[in-house]
Amino acid sequence: FSAEWKDWKDVHGKKYDSIDLESLRFKIFEENRLKVNEHNEEADKGIHSFRMGMNQFGDLLHSEFLDMYNGYTASSNLGSNVQLFDTDAPIPSYVNWTAKGAVTPVKDQGQCGSCWAFSAVRIQIDIEAKFTGSMEGQVFLSTKKLVSLSEQQLVDCSQDFGNLGCSGGLMENAFKYVIKEK
């Protein structure tokens, strides 16, 4: 195995149960690393507008990543409360919410299909700088204080509202839970 592989495993806390499994993951890592390097060479030539890097998912096949992080299929009979905004409102060309102090540090859902909980908690602010869905955003806009809220509480406690924990869920169901339990 390469030194880069060892360093990557150390950074991301990766351990494997057998040498066979580690060999498989190393092979996938190497294939992904080659794709990243090829992409970055093309980015350096102006073919792409962004560069890529090896993150904690570097030892996963694309299909494994999709299985782990795209697991929830919503019921087709769910009702929805759609809120329309003034589509003629002026849109700023650029807003940097990080510079405004409105963005909490990066969080990682790990191998739990809980993107819905992270989306419900993370900041989402509309073009008029009003709350549109996220609880951290609402707290920030109301108090000017940045508060990191618990996605885990939504994962653990909102099943009665239609969410499935690490198997998926909907932001709308998370909001219903928070409103009822406040």
Image (cartoon, helix red, strand yellow):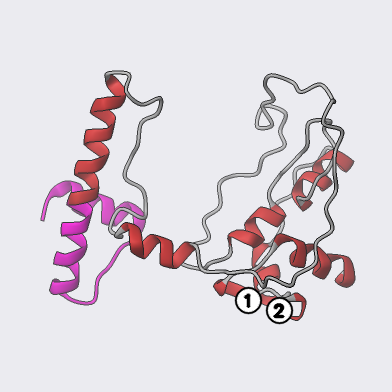
Compare residues 62 and 129 and report the one nearer the observer: 62
Horizontal side of 68 relative to 131 (left or right) equals: left
Label 2 to label 1, Cα distance in Å? Answer: 6 Å
Up/down of 74 relative to 140, above or below: below
Question: Given the current orientation, which residue lies at the most extreme front position?
Answer: 76
User: Where is residue 142 shown, x and y percent of the image?
Assistant: 89, 42
Label 1 neighbour load within 10 Å: few <14, some 14-19, many 20+: many
Numbered range of the magenta stretch: 1-30
Element on which disc 2 rests: helix
Up/down of 129 relative to 75, above or below: above
Q: Residue at x 53, y 67 (%)?
A: 113
Picture quadrant of residue 164: bottom right
Main SS type for the magenta part? helix
Up/down of 133 relative to 163, above or below: above
Where is mark 1, residue-wise?
164
Where is mark 2, residue-wise?
159
Which quadrant of the rendered structure holds the N terminus? bottom left
Is residue 6 one of those drawn in magenta? yes
User: Where is residue 51 shown, x and y percent of the image?
Assistant: 36, 31
Q: Which mark is residue 19?
A: none
Is residue 37 one of those drawn in magenta? no
User: Where is residue 152 shown, x and y percent of the image?
Assistant: 64, 68
Dots 2 and 1: beta carbons under 8 Å? yes
Which quadrant of the rendered structure holds the C terminus? bottom right
Question: Given the current orientation, which residue lies at the most extreme bottom position?
Answer: 160
User: Where is residue 102 shown, x and y percent of the image?
Assistant: 72, 37
Horizontal side of 50 relative to 118 (left or right) equals: left
Up/down of 132 relative to 119, above or below: above
